Amino acid sequence: VLQAPVSDRESLDLSPSTWKNLELAKRMIAEGKGGQLMPLETQEDGAPITANRFHSFAAKGGDDDHFSSDLTDEELWGLLRHMSGVPTLVLQSGEDEYIPHATVDADLLASRLSGAMGSSASHITVEGGSHALTGHTDEATDTISAFILRHKKD
């Protein structure tokens, strides 16, 4: 079960400092300093992070860029095809606060992700659900339980 898959890159786009920090990370990597911590003031939440790690989820095509809506179907297939044949439920949150809803259709993204995983994958969007599914845990639990029971091996 992939519960609330979101793009770190698209979520970070909600912050005005993202592009400046990404350029700094690229410079540090080019200078051979990718393993060093970025300056603390570049992180809005104050969490230490290396330039390599920031780049991996903030750059298009970065190592952790798996769930972005602007990836082509071919790119998604390349990233997710290893899950083909594995029963997978993409459980999307309809009101996920980490999805820029002005530009990303959460249900369409869930459909594209499950499509890239092949016929063994399915998707369901929990309408009104936040990233943590606050207030929708019963619905999510029922959905996940039904999925597991459907795919349980006797």
Image: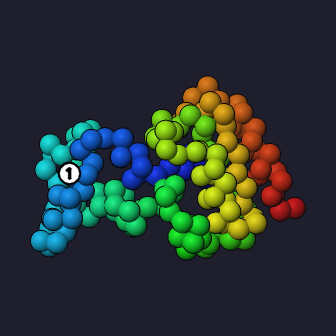
Read off the residue under disc 1: 20
Question: Hey, which quadrant is residue 139 in on the image?
Answer: top right
Q: Nearer the viewer, residue 32 or 72?
A: 72
From the viewer's perspective, tell me whether residue 75 is left or right of residue 56: right
Q: Which residue is pictured at 12% across the width and 71% down the height?
A: 31
Q: Tell me how many marks there are.
A: 1
Q: Nearer the viewer, residue 62 or 101?
A: 101
Question: Hey, which quadrant is residue 36 in on the image?
Answer: bottom left
Compared to 77, does 140 lie above or below?
A: above
Q: Which residue is pictured at 80% across the width and 45% down the height?
A: 146
Residue 120: % across, % down: 75, 64
Q: Residue furthest front?
A: 103
Tag 1: amino acid: Lys
Q: Residue furthest top?
A: 135
Q: Which residue is pictured at 19% across the width and 69% down the height?
A: 29
Q: Which residue is pictured at 48% across the width and 35% down the height?
A: 97
Compared to 52, does 8 lie above or below?
A: above
Secondary element at image label 1: helix
Please tell me how crowded label 1 is: few (under 14), some (14-19), or many (20+) other residues with Cα within 10 Å.
Answer: few
